[in-house]
Amino acid sequence: MTTVGHLRNELLATFRRNPQIGFSTASLNRALKLTSAEDFKVMVQALTGMENDDLIHQDDNQRYMLGGKPQSMQGVFHGNEKGFGFVAIEDQDNDMFIAPPNTKFAMDGDTVEVTVVHQARPGDTRGPEGAITKVVERKNTRLVGEYAPLSDAEHSRTGFIGTVTSHEKKLARYPIFIKDNGTVPERGDMIMAEITEFPNADRPNSMVGLIVQNLGNKNAPGVDIMSLVLANDIYVDYPDDAMAQANAIPDHVTAEDRLGRRDITDQPVVTIDGDDSKDFDDAVVAWKLPNGNYHLGVHIADVSYYVTEGSPLDKETYKRGTSTYLVDRVIPMLPFRLSNGICSLNPNEDRLAMSCDMEIDGEGRVVSHEIYQSVIRSHGRLTYNKVNQVLDGDPDATAEYGDLVPMLKLMADLHKILYKMRHGRGAIDFEENEAQIIVDDQGHPTDIVLRERGVSERMIESFMLQANETVAEHYNRMHVPFLYRVHETPDEDRIKDFVDFLATFGLQVPIKKGQQVTPKMLQNVNTEVAGTPEEMMVNVKMLRSLKQARYSDEPLGHFGIAAKYYCHFTSPIRRYPDLVVHRLIRTYAIEGTGDNVQTKWAEKLPDIAAQASTRERHSVDAERAVDDLKKAEFMADKVGEEFDAVVSGVAGFGMFVALPNTVEGLVHITRMTDDYYGFLESQMALIGERTHHIYRIGQPVRVKLEAVDVEQRQVDFSLVPTEDTPTTDLVVPKQPRRQPRRDEHKAGAPKPGDQGKRHNAKRPTGHAKPFRNTIGSQVKGHATRGGNKGNRH
């Protein structure tokens, strides 16, 4: 009789000869030429033992394969309209390619579990290939799309009244068949549909849903923006109970409200905001102390006093997380009655505030501080433009602001001290152009203008930064639970890639193996490349090396501004985390720091941090989508025109270019017809095989607008030949030849070399904007959306 040990050796040899093949017990029985039922029984025993020893595993079809059961990882699926996709796994540079048969009906943005099917081979730029084993969480349970009715015959046959199809290509491949719930839209209406049945084995190419809301015809004014707002899960309407709570709040500070607060209404605090701002949540005041130091008071509207913990309004603001600033409107976190009323530091009206007074020496050090609840009164609604004019010596602005002028000049001096202090410790100072899209009454874009940040904008940013740091450090030293804004130190591998990249330009960063990078090191790189042709390219590569800022209950520091402690304290009207920080300050001041209080907040803060980080990303995505929509609409009547541009991104499928007005578009590699271009990732460059022309980030180019797809928010350019295109001796190494995986080319997947690292792997069609300057949400930027300070450090 055959022994278990003998069969085990034969089975192992069979698996090793066929490492990618799954075997059923019947096929193994045939392969080993077993003839008796007893031998088959022994083989099953051998297989069980080998599986227990992690030598083999069973796949989804119960077939045996070589190797222990693959460990599953969790990530976010980024789908392509052709059916394939990629899974982005946190802290891994290379996304995992997912062929169409292995998507498990995941849709773009879904959180999934995935296992490796093929590891990346040396020299293969594609990265690993995987298979999705489970959809953990659907990103979209509701979708917005365009309605098309079914014919009477189709309605009778299927029971559905029509279909809703998303304008997003990645989701358009799954039309939603609509059940009749009494609502019958017109053709072309934009519909929000609740998904009741996702794609599955029985219905692989469509979904089933119900109409939740009819937004109106797609061509009606404002419907385009509202469609994107709802598609990005931004909440517009308030529940009745939340509005009832807001309407019941007095519109003035009462005697009861003042109890336990310090009255500082005599201090000449002022607000400084954009010309078109409607809500004011931060006010400042400054004066020189007898010892030569500066007194800086930062006074923030106390929203937490009115939005009480666990109330309907609190639940709604938690759900929203943040205000969203669009080209023609603001979708506020708080109802306007609060954000523009009792919670806004309107001039000459008493308001409740959380105050942070700081004494700052000539080196920018906070030598003492105090955090307390107050009643303040704004002595002036100042604007950035007018303050800049005052600081520039404009006589009319100086006369208008009168007695406030000496304080404004003192504030400018203090700002210079604080900036020098932050720069000295290594804060990374990226500047970015921010575009303001001008629209008419119908929502059509008429112009795109660049906003310039003057001294007043930077001054307020300095003061808010200092208050945020001071508050965060204060409560960290109290050793109590707190909510921080963190920007973690970059991963060692990403910094190594960045250092290797710099070396190709002769730039050296003195980082030894195992040594942790510091903000000062990267700041020095910024300084060295400032004003050079490589500046934009180096900045883009540096940004890719950094992590994304987020909220956390742990004080992990803020790498971008070189701060050991940092929180968001200064914008409770428009950010829920700031409201929570105020609530914590009030709690510790009134209830103390006993074990019960600390235990409660230690349990709550991780969920609050995760929710706030998620909602921030939704808001940023909505803002960008609307900006891109209106920019595309602005360019739609300019097809055929030529423009000066600069290369803003390079990938295997082509390059992105940015116009001076910040409009970005793609020059697809098929439109670069003067040569065959290869992508040299180490140089972030496209290089011609014959002409040796080279295109890099930051390089000026001349382009022609070829096409605009407003619905898809896509702008396509071609290159206009010029005689001064730079050339290079660099060559692109030949990519290793291999067979395509599982009909991937038929599915429209990228060709070898087009995939690879995350920035271009997710979106092989190339119409996304992977090189967009994301400093506002990642590292730096006291953003001025619609004139409202966003302060998204």
Image (cartoon, helix red, strand yellow):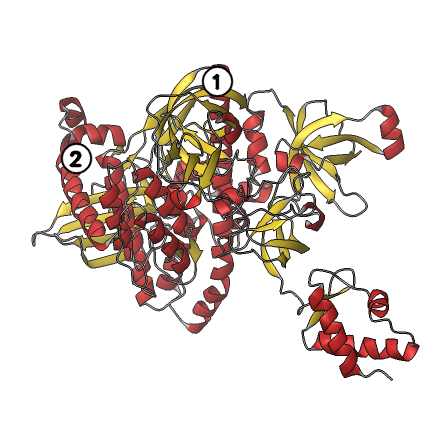
| Badge 1: residue crowd in 10 Å (few <14, some 14–19, many ≥20) | few
Quarter occupied by the N terminus: bottom right
Q: Secondary structure at mark 1?
A: loop
Q: Work out whether residue 684 or residue 387 is closer to the camera in this orientation and state it.
A: 684
| Direction from residue 496 to residue 232 in the image, left or right | right
Residue at horizontal 17 percent and vertical 35 percent from the top: 404
Q: Secondary structure at mark 2?
A: helix
Which residue is denoted by mark 1 in the rendering? 441
Up-down relation of residue 690 to residue 558 (above or below) = above
Q: Position of residue 400 (x, y in %)?
A: 18, 26
Residue at horizontal 73 percent and vertical 60 percent from the top: 21
Q: Position of residue 9 (x, y in %)?
A: 73, 77
Q: Position of residue 349 (x, y in %)?
A: 31, 37
Q: Work out whether residue 734 or residue 695 is closer to the camera in this orientation and state it.
A: 734
Q: Work out whether residue 240 or residue 624 is closer to the camera in this orientation and state it.
A: 624
Specify the label residue 404 is tagged with. 2
Three-letter amino acid code of the residue under disc 1: Asp
Q: Is residue 793 visible?
A: no
